[in-house]
Amino acid sequence: MAHVLSIGDWVKELSAFREQDFVVDRVLAFMKEHAVDPATLDRYLFFSLGNYTRNLIFRNELCEVITLCWEIGQGSRIHNHRDQNCWMATPIGRLRVQNYRVEERSEAGKTCRLVPTELAEMDAAHPVAVNPLEPVHQVLNLPEFRQRAVSIHVYSKPFDSCEIYSLERGTYSDVALHYTSVHGRLDPSEKLL
């Protein structure tokens, strides 16, 4: 059974990791052994009916920790993490992760062909790591889950843009990332529905 920590203590332990500690198995083991007390996340929870929200908790040169808040039925676009490692835990609700393999890719036309591969489900007891060999994925709060969800994402190293993929069009493109809130303060430009 995981040891439950406040988000502050959880981030403090994680931020003590050295660069060589930010490997897939090491951080995933930490997340399996140390759960976050959901009651300590309140200041980082901002929901919107329009889209899931990204809420920065901590960032340094080695990693960033954010909460993503998901209404029922919301999902991310299919995306990657710019060759950075990613780990996810879901202290509230549950989420499905659909992974993809890039079969074909053309830089000239920004076209690609994706093939769905593994599925994973996350809940409080089951964190996951993105496979660095096949990092393209999508996160979904399926309607049949019937509840909001909150996931904690750890990225090493931090990044400010990613590639998004369209299965329907067979294309990919770059997109800049932004935070809905930073350290518990809502971005003034955000309009939550």
Image (cartoon, rainbow, N blue to C red):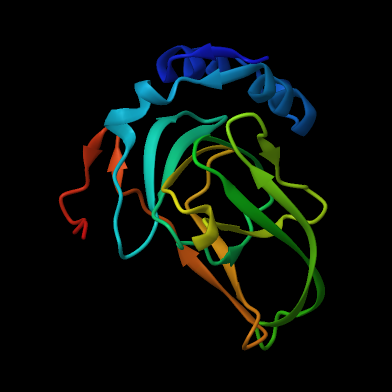
**Could you say where residue 99 lies in the image, as x and y percent from the top left?**
73, 59
The quadrant of the picture occupied by the N terminus is: top right
Comparing 68 with 83, the one in front is 68
**Could you say where residue 132 lies in the image, as x and y percent from the top left?**
77, 47
Query: Which residue reaches farthest left?
Result: 188
**Could you say where residue 41 lies in the image, as x and y percent from the top left?**
36, 27
Left or right of 117? Residue 97 is left
**Could you say where residue 114 lies in the image, as x and y percent from the top left?**
76, 75
Report the residue at 60% width, 17% height from top: 34
Q: In the image, is residue 143 above or below residue 40?
A: below
Comparing 178 with 66, the one in front is 66
Left or right of 32? Residue 124 is left
Comparing 26 with 118, the one in front is 118
Q: Is residue 21 visible?
A: yes
**Image-quadrant location for residue 122:** top right
Report the residue at 67% width, 85% height from top: 170
Q: Is residue 156 visible?
A: no
Q: In the image, is residue 29 above or below residue 104?
A: above
The quadrant of the picture occupied by the C terminus is: bottom left
**Image-quadrant location for residue 84:** top right
Q: In the image, is residue 6 above or below residue 86?
A: above
Comparing 84 with 102, the one in front is 102
Left or right of 192? Residue 131 is right
Please count the marks in the image.
0
**Image-quadrant location for residue 156:** top right
Report the residue at 48% width, 67% height from top: 175
